[in-house]
Every structure is written in C-alpha cells, then in structure tokens.
Image (tube, rainbow, N blue to C red):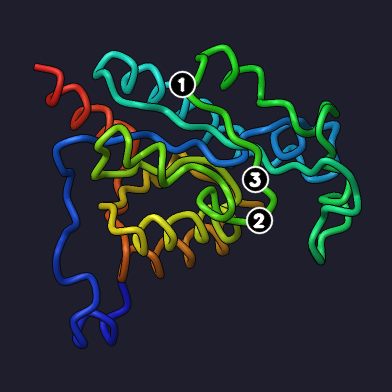
Amino acid sequence: MSDIYASRGYGSQAVGFGDKPALLVVDFQRGFTDPSMPMGGAPMVDAAVENTVRLMRAARAAGALTIACVNGYHSRAAVPRWKAAPVYDLLEGTEAVALDPRIAAEEPDVVLMKGAPSIFFATPCASILARHGIDTTIVTGCITSGCIRASVIDAFSHGYRVIVPHDAVGDHTQAAHDQNLADVGRRYADIMDTDGVIAALTQRNH
C-alpha cells in the first residue's frame, strides 16, 4: 500500500469473515478462459481457475453456498455499449458463454447469466444471498480490473463483508491486476490468498 494512502487512514482495519460466507465465481466461462477464444488464454486467469476449483471444494466441504455467473446475452440487441468487440459474441447458447469445464465439474449451487460487469446488477444474486443468510462474500473470477472490481464494489455496497483471494482472480496484465486489488483492498475488501481462505473455511467447518 502506498504510504500516502496509509497515512490518510486507508486500509487501517480488516473486514474479516462473518458468520456465513458464500463463494462468488465471476465469469469463468470459455469466452474468457479458452485460449481459442479472442479474450481467452491469459495465464493469470488460467491459474485463477485452478485456485477457484480448490475454493469450490473447500466451500462445499464447509457447507457454504457457491454462486457462479457468466456474461451473456439473448441476442446482439441486448448487448450494452461495450468497447470490447468480442463481448458482442457472448450469446446465450454459444460455447463462449459456457462455464469453463473445470468450474462446471464442481457443480456450483447457482449459475446466473449477467449482462453488466457486476454479478449483482440486474440479477437475483443479492436476493439469493439474503435468502441464505449470507454475510460474507468471497469473490473469485475474471477480469480483476473489470467485472471483479465491479462485483467487489457492489458486494460492499450491499453490506457484505468482502474477501478477494488474489490468486483466484485474474487479468490480462499483472499491473492491472495488482493496481485494482490495491485499490479495492484500501477501501472495500480484505485481500488474501487461496490457502488462507481455504483455512478460514475449513476452520469454520470444525
């Protein structure tokens, strides 16, 4: 953390885990993870998928809810004004909108389709979390500087404690990843690693 932020009180206290965490898996779909797709193939994203699989298994063992989402649209007419051309091909029913096979194999409890950066925007995510009494969200997925940042801010805005395992989210460049995690870590979320989050989930199961 930059000293100027710390000197002004940013990042001065941890969020911590509450009583009932849930795992949110954002946009680990083939359009962003498959190297054959225009936006896929980032090594950091691939590593983040593998760590998220570990977290999904730990969440299941701990009895914690897992909600996954994909970014997709019924038709091109439904797509907002994205500045990234490949997003216009994220159409419902295509391979680009399918969950990464590694994530699908872990059978998330809920799978949502969203049309904006945040997993919360115009989806039932918040109402599902409320129905299950969730107070803590563990946010994984991609891309750190886009949909992860948006989802973290919305989770915070909805009143949840927010945990981000830095090695279970990914971006196209290390610099964008690091800067955005630093920003949300100063303000909204605890930045941990996958092993630390798994340990916290495991401890809650004993």
Q: Residue at x 62, y 56 (%)?
A: 117
Residue drawn at point x = 35 percent, y = 26 percent: 65
Q: Quadrant of residue 176?
A: bottom right
In this picture, is 149 found above or below 23?
below
- Amino acid carrying mark 3 in the image: Lys
Mark 3 or mark 1, which has the lower sequence index? 1
Residue contact between numbered discs 3 and 2, judged by CB atoms under 8 Å: yes
Position of 27 compared to 38: left or right? left
Mark 1 residue crowding within 10 angstroms, few (<14) / some (14–19) / many (20+): few
Could you say which quadrant of the image residue 81 lies in?
Answer: bottom right
Identified by mark 1, the residue type is: Asp
Would you name the residue on which mark 1 appears? 109
* Residue that appears at 46% across and 29% down: 52
* Gap between marks 3 and 2 measured at Cα: 6 Å
Q: What whole-number distance in Å separates the C-alpha atoms at marks 3 and 1?
A: 16 Å
Other residues around mark 3 within 10 Å, as few (<14) / some (14–19) / many (≥20): many
The 10 Å Cα crowd at callout 2, few under 14, some 14 to 19, many 20 or more, is some
Kind of element beneath mark 1: loop
SS at badge 3: strand
Q: Is residue 23 above or below residue 13?
A: above
Q: Which residue is mark 3?
A: 114
Where residue 151 sits: x, y (%)? 49, 54
Name the kind of residue labelled 2 in the image.
Ala
Relative side of 98 to 62, left or right: right
Residue 116 disc label: 2
* Rendering coords of residue 178 (x, y %): 47, 60
- x and y percentages locating residue 159 in the rendered image: 28, 58
